[in-house]
Image: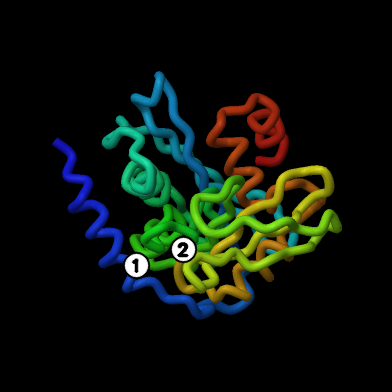
Amino acid sequence: MINTQQLRQEQTEKAQQIILTDQFTAPTYIAGADVGFEDGGAVTRAAIVIMHYPSFEILEYQIARIPTTLPYIPGLLSFRECPALLAAWQLIKQKPSLIFVDGQGIAHPRRLGVASHFGLLVDTPTIGVAKSRLCGIDKAVNEEVGSHEPLMDKNEQIGWIYRSKKKCKPLYVSPGHKVSMEGALQWVELCMKGYRLPEPTRWADGIASNRRLFEQLNKNKL
């Protein structure tokens, strides 16, 4: 039987270890990480893509498939996704200096979303780039690309609401680990190429989702 109270307590303890200052210099290698599920959720599939910065040339990607170890439980998603991310990480030859994770960083009720949890486990700076809000007060964001508003929860800033593309829903950007609040937004902006998602998570999302278009593009690039 799953002890959800114990897992929540573990999140609270791990959140105390999160560092919210920039612990990296201008990176040469950046990564995108994302997780998908197969066989009705029975298999967890994680993808990590390594890119050169600032060219965004894809240098390597790895996909790990493992049996899903935990059912979906709101607020405990990182325990479900991190085992597969760790498996993919072990396959990566060129480790990056900065990882963009498709999911929440500290923008989480206990300040430990998957980006923070994974960053702590691999001791690497991470940024959470989520397509939807998990917690905090939503605000309207100007339609102009690059517009942003602080994402607040209980009088604490936990991230940014960021307009990455016109006529698209905003992204929810938050520091994961070893990245500052300002640094998280800055690096997401630096990695935008006209799409809704920054390049690292755009490619990781496509690979993790097993999209044929991305498979073909990667065949052409690698």
Mark number displayed over residue 106:
2
Eyeballing the image, is 63 above or below 132? Answer: above
Task: State how many labels appear.
Answer: 2
Report the front residue among 188 and 145. 145
Mark number displayed over residue 179:
none
Report if the CB atoms under discs 1 and 2 are less than 8 Å apart: yes
Residue positioned 64% across, 68% down in the render: 150
Q: Earlier in the sequence, mark 1 or mark 2?
A: 1
Q: Amino acid at mark 2?
A: Ile
The 10 Å Cα crowd at callout 1, few under 14, some 14 to 19, many 20 or more, is some
Question: Is the C terminus in the top left, top right, bottom left or bottom right quadrant?
Answer: top right
User: Residue 46 in the image: x percent, y percent?
Assistant: 45, 40
Residue positioned 34% across, 41% down in the render: 80
User: Residue 190 in the image: x percent, y percent?
Assistant: 73, 65
Eyeballing the image, is 15 above or below 109? Answer: below
Eyeballing the image, is 65 above or below 23? Answer: above
In the image, is 193 to the left or to the right of 8? right
The 10 Å Cα crowd at callout 2, few under 14, some 14 to 19, many 20 or more, is many
Separation of disc 1 and disc 2 at Cα?
8 Å
Report the front residue among 214 and 139. 139
Residue positioned 75% across, 56% down in the render: 163
Report the front residue among 3 and 53. 3
Residue positioned 54% across, 48% down in the render: 102
Q: Amino acid at mark 1?
A: Ala
Residue where numbered disc 1 is placed = 15
User: Residue 174 in the image: x percent, y percent?
Assistant: 55, 63
Q: Secondary structure at mark 2?
A: loop
In the image, is 198 to the left or to the right of 143? left
User: Residue 191 in the image: x percent, y percent?
Assistant: 71, 60
